[in-house]
Every structure is written in C-alpha cells, then in structure tokens.
Image: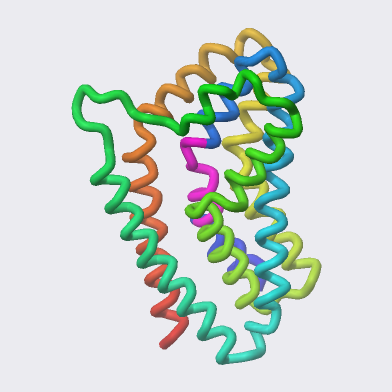
Amino acid sequence: MLSQAIGDLLPLAVGVALSPVPIVAVILMLGTPKARVNGPAFTLGWVLGLVVVSVIVLVVAGGADSDKSSSDALDVIKLALGVVFLFMALKQWRGRPKEGEEPTLPRWMAAIDTFTPGRSFVFGALLSGVNPKNLALTLAAAASIAQAGLGTTDSAIAVAVFVVIGSLTVAGPVVFFMFGGSRATKPLASIKDLMGGHNAVIMMVVLLVLGAKLIGSGISGLN
C-alpha cells in the first residue's frame, strides 16, 4: 500500500535531509563567485545520487513482496543497518568536540571556492549516493518500498517522495539564494554555523533514532 510505504520511508528521508556536511557544503558553495552554477550542479548531483541508489535497490529486491525468503532477507538487512547506526551514533558521540574545541569539517571544503560545476555535481552525487550514512538510509528506504509490493507507478511515487524530502535541505538553500539574493546571506550563514558547530550531536541523535526504528522494523518483519 502506497500510504504505508511512504509512512515507513519518511523518517529515513528526514534522516538523509538532516546531514550537516552537505548542508554546510552547499551553503559555502553559495558564497563563492560561481554560486549560481555550482549550487544547482551540486543539488542535481545530490538528487541523482539518491535516485540511482534507490532504483538499483528496487530492481535487485523487486521480488521481495512475493518471496518470503527475500522479504526476510530485507528485514535482516534492516536489522543489521539498525545495529550499524547505533554503533555510528556511539562513534559520533565519542568523537564530538570537547568544550572549547572547534569542530572539524572535511578538508575538501577549504577548496570549495575553486570548484567547477562538474566537480560540484560529482561531490553532490558522492555525498548522497556513496556517503555511508546516506547510502544505508537509501538502502533501507528502497527495501521498504520493495517489501510493500507496489506497482511500478506507486514505486516511482514513493521514490520521488523519498528523494524530494531527502533533498529539501540541500535544494532549499539554493532556491533561497537564487531568489533571495543578498537577503539570503545572513540566514544561510546562521544555518551553516548551527549545522557545522553541532555536526556530531545532530548526527548522533539522527543515527540513534533511525537505528532504533530500523531494528524495530526488522524484528517486527521477522516475526
């Protein structure tokens, strides 16, 4: 059922959207001379990464709704991903900056003002489709869609909902910048400081909640 499938993937899509690193990256990109081409290129790469991974998993797991063993395998995958998320949450908590320390961001961000549109596109795709956390969330979302036994049209709608929600925090700043002009500078800078300064804590909470959800979903499906 489409509504149930969308309900199952909503928390996963929000988990993808609440990724501090790509949010900080796209906002930094919007402060460069090539903002009006690099921002949309980064967003397009991000969207494409989510779509490609979702479609691949759906094609591979397409028979899960009619095959009990395949469905059980997907539940085991959810359970395993949930456990991995809990360990990742613990790692984020242990690695959080100590009081007075400056949070560290990826080194490539220091060169973001030299990015070309092509490089921006590639980084967007990598951060959405290859980043371990987002890859795991997309796998879990696509597995949920596959288990729902939807038709081609409904599966496409479910994937579209996942991608749109998962892309809001990346595409949103770009749209705001394109239409807001100078008025967008201060709000975007505040968001960048918030997400960058609390990266570890935000990721820890997201991973903890989603890990618990996936473990519960996996256990429920296996019963």
Q: Please, what is the dominant secondary structure of the magenta stretch?
A: helix
Q: Residue at x 63, y 8 (%)?
A: 182
Q: Which residues are magenta?
A: 12-21
| Residue 92, image x, y percentages | 32, 46
Q: In this view, which residue lies farthest toward the bottom? A: 68
Q: How many marks?
A: 0
Q: In this view, which residue lies farthest toward the left? A: 99
* Residue 178 covered by magenta stretch: no
Image position of 212 (left or right of 42): left
| Picture quadrant where residue 117 is located | top right
Q: Residue at x 80, y 67 (%)?
A: 153
Quarter containing the C terminus: bottom left
In this rendering, is residue 157 above or below 17?
below
| Picture quadrant where residue 208 is located | bottom left
| Residue 54, image x, y percentages | 67, 61
Quarter containing the N terminus: bottom right
